[in-house]
Image (spheres, grey):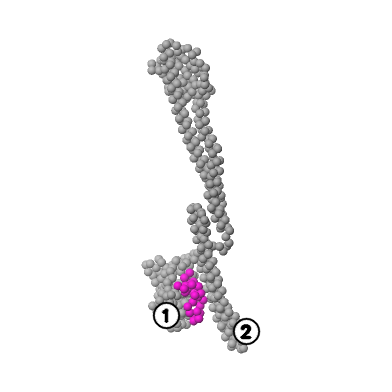
Amino acid sequence: MTRWFSLRRRLLGLLLGGISAVWSLTLLLSYLDAQHEIDELFDAQLAQSAQTLLALATHDDEDERIGDLSEVGDAAHEYQRHLRFQIWRDDGRLAMRSENAPETPLTVDRGFAERPDATALWRTYSQWNRERSLQVQVAEDHAIRDELTRNIAWRFLLPMLFGLPLIGLGTWLATRRGLAALDALAGQIASRQAAQLQPIVPASAPEEIRPMLEALNQLFARVEQTLESERRFTADAAHELRTPLAALQAQAQVALQARDDAERNRSLAQLQIGLVRAAHLVDQMLLLARLDPEQGLPAAEAVDLPALVEEVCAELGNAILARELDFDFIPADGMVHGQREWLRVLARNLIDNAIRYTPRGGQLRVVVAATAEALLLQVADSGPGIPASERQRVLERFHRLHAGEVPGSGLGLAIVARIAALHGASLELDASPLGGLEVRVRWPR
């Protein structure tokens, strides 16, 4: 069961999904990079602040003024409330601190560290002066960094939130315009009548649908060829059936108007002969109609060709004896892959044609020959033969060279040609060394 989907929606989903995924990945990487750079920047500022305080405290310590906490004023900026510092002496006494700093050490680690308390997570930095007489500890609320990182992320995210619908609209318009050629092509095909099988030649079309369009045109050509073949077959069949049916009707009228039993019996005998010929013609036409090269071989199997040809010769033995022919059958081992009954029809038509066209007392030779390259079936006779200019035409349906001399339907060689084509074999007509016609069917190894 076919699962239908919208190509437009699928393209739109794939494009927007791809854009969103790439944009989201870019946003994530940018966020992580911004977070890293902000940490580096703030850590550098934190270390610089600590070193500045340490330098000032060392200078004031020489002037013995470091313990005066009144010199540290109120916060001038809101971010200052998120900053703390302490200056400790080497004997463990607190020399100076910011108003929001506790009286206990901000950190016990040297250098950078992170330490939470009841109010926030703090990024700390501590450093001793060169004489190791004073230590500065600086702490910064981690929320400052997080807030700045979030602001940067929002500045990346907002264009995406507003831009993605615009990109979606543009993508939808682009896919709609890009697929308009498919809609036009579908409309052109839908507007055709059943008999319009000429190739589709759009004014413009995407290169991507060119293989599909060429395959569709090839299908149209095959359908047109099949319909034309069927039309010709129907016309030829109607033409060929008209003559035997008219003859049957005439024989029936003669039988009805017969003056005595002898005349009636002669008419009925002719009527029976005509019915046999008409039945044979109908059988041949039905067989030819079933031999469709497009459908392949049904029930194909390995067939012993010499044995099959020998069986056909035995079936036609009475006809060979009735015409007193000098008959010769030369077999050779060989197997072909194909449909047994159709191969039987092929051999029977070839040998039956040779029997009917060979004059009484003439020669008929059937050979199955095997070579390294091919397996051949050769049927040669001493009949009238076929001129080289007519050998291709006799393979057409209902084409006969000696229509008034030898009874037949004109379908035998056409059926042979069709069966040979179905089996991948070639059919050759040539002059026979016996003086008549030689037909060769060649199956490549």
Residue nearest the observer in this picture, 240 or 77: 77
Numbered disc 2: secondary structure:
helix
Q: Position of residue 111 (x, y in %)?
A: 43, 23
Give the residue type that dot 1 points to.
Ser
The question of residue 205 being in magenta is answered with: no
Give the residue type that dot 2 points to.
Leu
Q: Position of residue 118 (x, y in %)?
A: 53, 22
Numbered disc 1: secondary structure:
loop
**Residue 169, visible in the rendered structure:** yes
Q: Earlier in the sequence, mark 1 or mark 2?
A: 2
- The quadrant of the image that shows the C terminus is bottom left
Residue at 53 percent of width and 45 percent of height: 171
Q: Which residue bears the numbered disc 2?
A: 256
Mark 1 Cα within 10 Å, few/some/many (few <14, many 20+)? many
Residue at 51 percent of width and 58 percent of height: 201
- The quadrant of the image that shows the N terminus is bottom right
Type of secondary structure dominating the magenta stretch: loop
Q: Which residue bears the numbered disc 1?
A: 382
Residue at 50 percent of width and 43 percent of height: 18
Is residue 73 placed above or below 244 in the rendered structure?
above
Is residue 416 placed above or below 136 in the rendered structure?
below
Residue nearest the observer in this picture, 156 or 85: 156
**Number of callouts in the render?**
2
**Residue 109, visible in the rendered structure:** no
Q: Position of residue 345 (x, y in %)?
A: 48, 72
Is residue 356 placed above or below 41 in the rendered structure?
below
- Tell me the magenta residue range: 392-418
